[in-house]
Image (cartoon, rainbow, N blue to C red):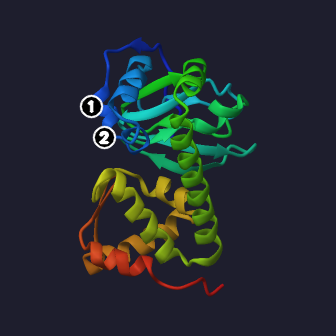
């Protein structure tokens, strides 16, 4: 996963995006008037494949929503090893933690494929929170959902064997991107915390059973029922 273009490019003011924001889970419950206000504050930001949006330690100066494409949220070690913490797709909101506490970013964010984001600056968002306190309730809900997601990931890594862990990750990715998922086996192995060879062996088992089809940086779920059954398997035996 090469970092292909340095930091993100210039941003451009856009027209209101009420229709797009209204389909987003984070914004949809706020009502049309507040969504209109938020839309007027948004700017678009386009990223090329592999382009870095921000790095861990950068200022937390904006909230982002993925309009098109994908964003990888990653952590890196001093030796250069990378861990994919999350894969975000159309409609996903991120950057909220540093936005609220004013501290630096807690992870890296990089585009995977051509990507378009909606961005609201920290200054504009803080002013909006003062004027529209109901947005704070939605933000608390988002933070709670993020905490539950992190807890689930820790539980999976600690208790589940690879097949159910991998099946759950595929099903989660399918929720965002559909049954045909554009992801390399290397990225998927980092995402589930296992060796690429081990992930490949399991995918080949599912391919032979007709549960998935494998392509170049692409996995298609064919038999969703089987993957759901795999996701419900038991604990690790190690």
Q: Nearer the viewer, residue 235 or 140?
A: 140
Residue 75 position, x and y percent, is 65, 45
Count residues near mark 1 (Cα–Cα under 10 Å), then give few for <14, some for 14-19, many for 20+: few
Residue 177 position, x and y percent, is 32, 51
Residue 161 position, x and y percent, is 55, 78
Give me the residue at 44% from left, 58% from top.
185
Give me the residue at 39% from left, 44% from top.
89
Give me the residue at 49% from left, 31% from top.
64
Please give left or right for residue 137 compared with residue 203 in the image: right
> What residue does disc 2 label?
23
Q: Is residue 217 visible?
A: no
Q: Nearer the viewer, residue 223 or 214?
A: 223
Q: Is residue 207 visible?
A: yes
Residue 12 position, x and y percent, is 40, 12
> Residue 33's image quarter?
top left
Is there a contact, CB below 8 Å, between mark 1 and mark 2?
A: yes
Please give left or right for residue 227 compared with residue 144 in the image: left
Give me the residue at 53% from left, 32% from top.
3
Under circle 1, the secondary element is helix
Count residues near mark 2 (Cα–Cα under 10 Å), then give few for <14, some for 14-19, many for 20+: few
Q: Nearer the viewer, residue 187 or 222?
A: 222
> What residue does disc 1 label?
19
Q: Quadrant of the C terminus?
A: bottom right
C-alpha gap between disc 1 and disc 2: 7 Å
């Amino acid at each position: 996963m090469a970092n292909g273009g340095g930091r993100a490019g210039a941003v451009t003011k856009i027209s209101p995006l009420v229709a797009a924001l209204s389909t987003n889970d984070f914004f949809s419950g706020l009502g049309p008037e507040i969504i209109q206000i938020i839309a007027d504050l948004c700017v678009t930001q386009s990223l090329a494949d592999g382009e870095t949006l921000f790095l861990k330690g950068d200022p937390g100066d904006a909230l982002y929503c993925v309009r098109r494409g994908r964003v990888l949220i990653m952590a890196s070690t001093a030796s250069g090893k990378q861990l994919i913490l999350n894969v975000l797709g159309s409609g996903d909101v991120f950057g909220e933690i540093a936005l609220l506490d004013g501290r630096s970013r807690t992870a890296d964010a990089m585009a995977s494929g051509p990507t378009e984001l909606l961005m609201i600056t920290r200054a504009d968002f803080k002013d909006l929170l003062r004027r529209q306190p109901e947005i704070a309730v939605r933000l608390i809900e988002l933070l709670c959902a993020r905490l539950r997601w992190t807890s689930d990931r820790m539980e999976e890594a600690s208790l589940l064997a690879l097949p159910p862990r991998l099946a759950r990750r595929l099903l989660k990715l399918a929720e965002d991107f559909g049954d045909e998922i554009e992801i390399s086996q290397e990225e998927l192995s980092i995402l589930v915390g296992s060796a690429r060879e081990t992930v490949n062996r399991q995918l080949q088992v599912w391919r032979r059973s007709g549960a998935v089809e494998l392509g170049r940086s692409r996995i298609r779920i064919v038999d969703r029922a089987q993957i759901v059954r795999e996701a419900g398997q038991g604990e690790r035996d190690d």
